[in-house]
Amino acid sequence: MESQRTFLFIGLLLVSFLLFTEWQKETNQPKADTSATQTVTNTSLNDNADVPTSSTGIPVLTPSVDRQVITVTTDVLAVKIDTKGGDIVEAKLLQHMESHGSDTPYLLLGEFDGRQYVSQSGLVGLNGPDAAQQGRPVYTSEQSEYTLTGDELRVPLSFVDSNGVQYTKTYVFKANRYDVALQYDINNVTENPVQVQLYTQIKRTVQDKGSMIDQTYLGATYGTVDEPYEKYSFSDMSEANLNKSTQGGYIAFIQHWFVSAWVPDQASQNQIYSAIRSGQGIIGIKAEPTNVAAGQTSTIAATYYMGPKDTDALEAIHTDLDLTVDYGWLWFISQPLLTLLKFLYGLIGNWGVAIIAITVIVKTALYPLTKAQYTSMAKMRMLQPKMQALKERFGDDRQKFGQAMMELYRKEQVNPMGGCFPLLLQMPIFLALFYVFLESTELRHAEFALWLTDLSSKDPYYVLPILFGASMFLTQKLQPMTVTDPMQQKMMTWMPVIFSVFFLWFPSGLVLYWLVSNLISIAQMLIIYRGMEKKGMNVRG
């Protein structure tokens, strides 16, 4: 049973290592291009090649034109809006830094060493200004800079087409919010009806960065009435254009810790689409046509989110948008654990101590399973001399040996699988905790104590990995080796060293969790074994 337990533990750690490998790739994405602010007006970000159409889907290619870039600053965002098309071409997160200890805000949207990541929106359809042959509209703005001073900031952009139809595209920013309301007001002062279609989309340079395990995923996602959360990677886009009709829905681009997403009118029948054009991956959502009668006005709205993967904030925008905080198939366990972790942090005020506390709570709750596991393993070790005697008695007669062994189990009231089942039941909970520590934005750059000033990065002095290896070694000493195969014995001997090396590059928050879990397991093991020894059982050989 111990060897089975060992292989299960190895599998868990290998999964953890693969997850962290992909996590490290994501965090090492190219640094923000500091010249983005100066070069954005000279870069062809917006043209009709990006604009969806309502019929053939074939855009009209037109040369780019000069435009103005206006800046918007709130308490959490620093945004640049291109007046050509009214797109968001840069977004800095003022409460999240590029790296720990840095004073440079994290650049979520913008230019990344030649790569682009922008949010676009417009009006197409029969009379939409973004569907015009001459190219996308160039809006006018009363100011070149806007700063939030109260609870709400409105940034209006105006455009009048050749027929005299007046369009006002307004972004509404709110204090301490990463979601921005988009509002299109159409004033049809002409004598003819006007029909337009709102589209909202996200465009990002194709990056050849897949994930062996869908956790630190970088790519597009969408949600429909029937599919609350689906990934659509760059490779998926290159194979086929997405075309889904749904009431409501959403589209997003996600990466480690951060997400940008468009949420349209949930009462509208919308079309979700994707494309790859000129090396840019695009996912978007197009609303049903809006008809504006002559002399009438109409308003079309949507919401754009650009910020950290905050489950509460995302769920407030759309019921399923919090699924972009991707905990994999164990989300139904991870979400309650995250809620508990946040609660503990609210009481304690330190994420490292909160990790220790939640580990203690989980290990304590699972103590009955742990006790059953160690008790079964101890009983199996006590039967080793009798098992050896049976093996010598029946020799190569496997059938008689098997029958005698089962009779021995029945007589001694030992379940040979008793050490495995409790462990298997605990595995989903521990993996769910692993996903919580890996994916939760709250732990990014979170401080613990002493030299551990960033729980999302490795231990700079490798103290925790070494202590973890020592705890594994101690566990082995407390559980005498029962395997007889020399190769397995070598694996068991070197396992603490191997896993200590793996853990050198793990985020220190994860290593802290595993170390505390091991220490609690050792304490529980000693309590269980001493209780059995008091009953006269020689459980440790």
Image (tube, helix red, strand yellow):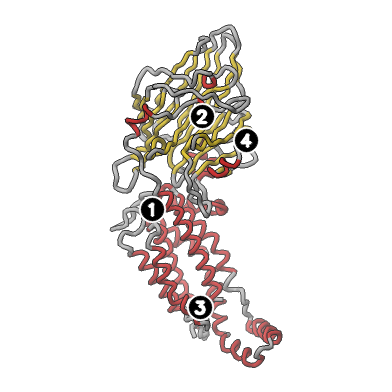
**Gap in angstroms between the C-alphas marked 3 and 4:** 53 Å
- What is the three-letter code of the residue carrying label 3? Gln
**Gap in angstroms between the C-alphas marked 2 and 4:** 16 Å
Discs 2/4, front: 2
Of the residues under marks 3 and 4, which one precedes in the sequence? 4
Q: Is residue 365 above or below residue 435?
A: below
**Gap in angstroms between the C-alphas marked 1 and 4:** 38 Å
**Gap in angstroms between the C-alphas marked 3 and 2:** 59 Å
Please tell me the numbered disc located at residue 488: 3
The quadrant holding residue 513 is bottom left
Q: Is residue 200 above or below residue 140?
A: below
Residue 95 seen in this snapshot: no
Provide the secondary structure element on which disc 3 rests: helix
- What is the three-letter code of the residue carrying label 2? Asp
**Residue at the disc numbered 4:** 243
Provide the secondary structure element on which disc 2 rests: helix
**Residue at the disc numbered 2:** 50
Discs 2/1, front: 2
**Residue at the disc numbered 1:** 456
